[in-house]
Image: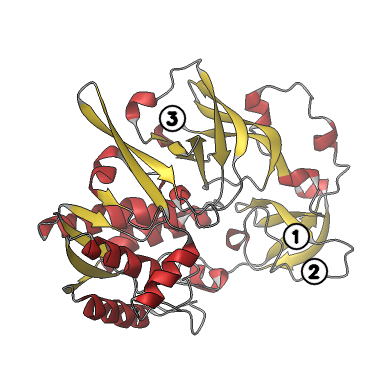
Amino acid sequence: MAKIVVGLSGGVDSSVAAYLLKEQGHEVIGLFMRNWHDTTGTLEGDCPWYDDQVFAELVAKRLDIPFRFVDLSEEYRKRVVDYMFSEYEQGRTPNPDVLCNREIKFDVFLKEALKMGADFVATGHYCQKAEQTIDGKTVYSLLAGADKNKDQSYFLCQLTQEQLKYALFPIGHLQKPEVRQIAQEQKLATAKRKDSQGICFVGKVDLPVFLQQQIAAKQGNIHEILPSWRGYQNMPTDADVETLARPFSYTVRDGKKIGTHNGAHFYTIGQRKGLGIGGRKESLFIIATDVKDNVIYVGEGDNHPGLYRKALRILPQQIHWVNTTEYMEVGESRRYMVRIRYRQPLQAAQLIQRSDGLYILFDEPQRGIAAGQFAAWYDGERLAGSGVIEK
């Protein structure tokens, strides 16, 4: 049997993961990581780290497994939070949860576990791992979780072969209600605890307040772009993928000023809340942000053409293949199913490798494509690769 360190987060999923591994006869150690101290912008009552640690300790005690604590807040600040601030400052939309898994849980935390003599690290993610031998070498695959409503493979889309080698996902084959039932049967303290929300290890935050720790508020104008704008009308129906991947570019002369905001950095493509403009038949949505001139562009209605694009581009250095032997040669194209955000239904698309990057051409226009997000592509249940959207 193996020595396995479980990342006990204080939630029901990691608690049941630890229980299942112990039931299988493994030597299990619960390790709680504290990654964030600052409460600036955190909405009151949303699972402060102290409560998480208390619940994690209660579970370890109930399961009669050793409990350890590690403070990784310095690494988390440098690798995840500073990256977040930098991306928002450039008008991009980062996904800190993807970064947290790549940089913290399966890097810094994994190294801590290996120092403790662990053979594997386990988490409560709803995803699965498979392995096969190809030409005498073990190749690991990341698969979607059995519970399609909770599948978290997207959040792990940047993991490498070396990271997957040590990773275990004990609840990936279960449905969420089954996990809750096991926790109740075993009288685990986390059985009825709500799932955490918001930024990984920070919690649910008021994003503008949180970002104002490093990005100053600055009043700017909101301009509305009408669906009849010439740029939409002039888009060729047979445009090549490079043109289709280019975001629409607006100037203040293209629309009418309808309000003000406190900083373009604090908003993202597709957002409709927080604009403070009412009296419309349909909601206003952000279709573009210009952080240089501090202007937000909006369009009315969920079907506004400015919300949709057929393609996106990923820079060469941002392309990540879980199995590196699958990389595409320049000029090659393949069909995959793709998602650009967590829980988005998979979308059929063509991946086209060019010298200036990887283009993803969707069969249907996609809503709210934003630079900084991660696109992940799947071959059936298997997550094949991912990359940061450049534009």
The C terminus - image quarter: top right
Q: How many marks?
A: 3
Q: CA distance from mark 1 to mark 3?
A: 34 Å
Residue topped by disc 3: 316
- Between 168 and 209, which is closer to the camera in this rendering? 168
Residue topped by disc 2: 277
Give the structural element (helix, strand or loop) at label 2: loop
Image vertical order of residue 337 relative to residue 8, above or below? above
The first of marks 2 and 3 along the sequence is 2
Q: What's the residue at 22%, 65% (across, down)?
A: 22
Q: What's the residue at 39%, 70% (across, down)?
A: 182
Indicate the position of residue 245 as horizontal and vertical percent values: 63, 32
Q: Choose mark 2 or mark 1, whichever is in front.
A: 2
Image vertical order of residue 54 relative to residue 391, above or below? below
Q: CA distance from mark 2 to mark 3?
A: 40 Å
Q: Choose mark 1 or mark 3, whichever is in front.
A: 3
Give the structural element (helix, strand or loop) at label 3: helix
Q: CA distance from mark 2 to mark 1?
A: 10 Å
Marks 1,3: beta carbons within 8 A: no
Residue 16: which quarter of the image?
Answer: bottom left
- Between 32 and 24, which is closer to the camera in this rendering? 24
Q: Label 2 neighbourhood size at 10 Å, few (<14), some (14-19), many (20+)?
A: some
Indicate the position of residue 357 as horizontal and vertical percent values: 49, 27
Q: Label 1 neighbourhood size at 10 Å, few (<14), some (14-19), many (20+)?
A: many
Residue kind at label 2, given as amino acid type = Ile
Q: Label 3 neighbourhood size at 10 Å, few (<14), some (14-19), many (20+)?
A: some
* Residue found at the far top of this picture: 331
Q: Going by the image, does 93 lie left or right of 322?
A: right
Residue topped by disc 1: 222
Q: What's the residue at 72%, 67% (across, down)?
A: 275
Give the structural element (helix, strand or loop) at label 1: strand
Residue kind at label 1, given as amino acid type = Ile
